[in-house]
Image (cartoon, grey):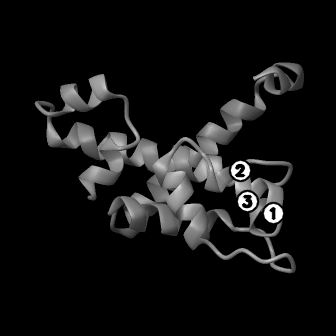
Amino acid sequence: MNRDHVLAELPTATVAWLATADPRTLDQIARDVAARTVTRLLSGEQAGDAAWDHVQYDLLRRDLSPAVRALAATLPHARTGGRWSQKGVVRAACAFFGLAGSGVKRDVAARVRHLQEDFLSIPVAARRAA
């Protein structure tokens, strides 16, 4: 796991607390961080549109998250290209955070689905206000 990439996504107080936490805790947090990064990269009108939508792509390149900025820069981007797939973005995020193994990728993908379901359960008016 790339500990520095994971910790860069977390609040300072959490980073300090993790210094003495069980290593398994950091592993689970790294998976959550990867899933949230994937969810952010796939956000928009249609999942993965930033692959061809220059406005959305530019917003991701300026995101507050260092991981989102870095991964957006490495994912393919062209006006005529297709959308980014969840599988491809999960693969890229796992590589960025140093999370290896097919089981880990499946777990991160499941966490992405959970985050997307939670988001979709929020009423549309509340989503627009956020």
- The disc at residue 10 is none
Name the residue beneath numbered marker 1.
54
In the displayed orientation, state which residue is furthest to the left.
20
Left or right: 101 in relation to 24:
right
Which is more N-terminal, label 2 or label 1?
1
Q: Label 2: few (<14), some or many (≥20) within 10 Å? A: few
In contact (CB < 8 Å): disc 3 and disc 1: yes
Rendered position, 100 above or below 128: below
* Nearest the eye: 122 or 49: 49
Callout 3: SS? helix
Left or right: 111 in relation to 80:
left
In contact (CB < 8 Å): disc 3 and disc 2: yes
- The residue that appears at 14% across and 35% down in the rendered structure is 22
| Residue 47 in view in this figure | no
Name the residue beneath numbered marker 3.
57
- The residue that appears at 44% across and 44% down in the rendered structure is 33
Callout 2: SS? helix
- The residue that appears at 66% across and 76% down in the rendered structure is 76
Residue 129 lies in quadrant = top right
Residue 87 position, x and y percent, is: 60, 67
Residue 84 position, x and y percent, is: 71, 68
Task: Calculate the distance from the C-alpha at mark 1 to the C-alpha at mark 2.
Answer: 9 Å
Name the residue beneath numbered marker 2.
59
Task: Calculate the distance from the C-alpha at mark 3 to the C-alpha at mark 1.
Answer: 5 Å
Task: Calculate the distance from the C-alpha at mark 3 to the C-alpha at mark 2.
Answer: 5 Å
Rendered position, 81 above or below 55: below
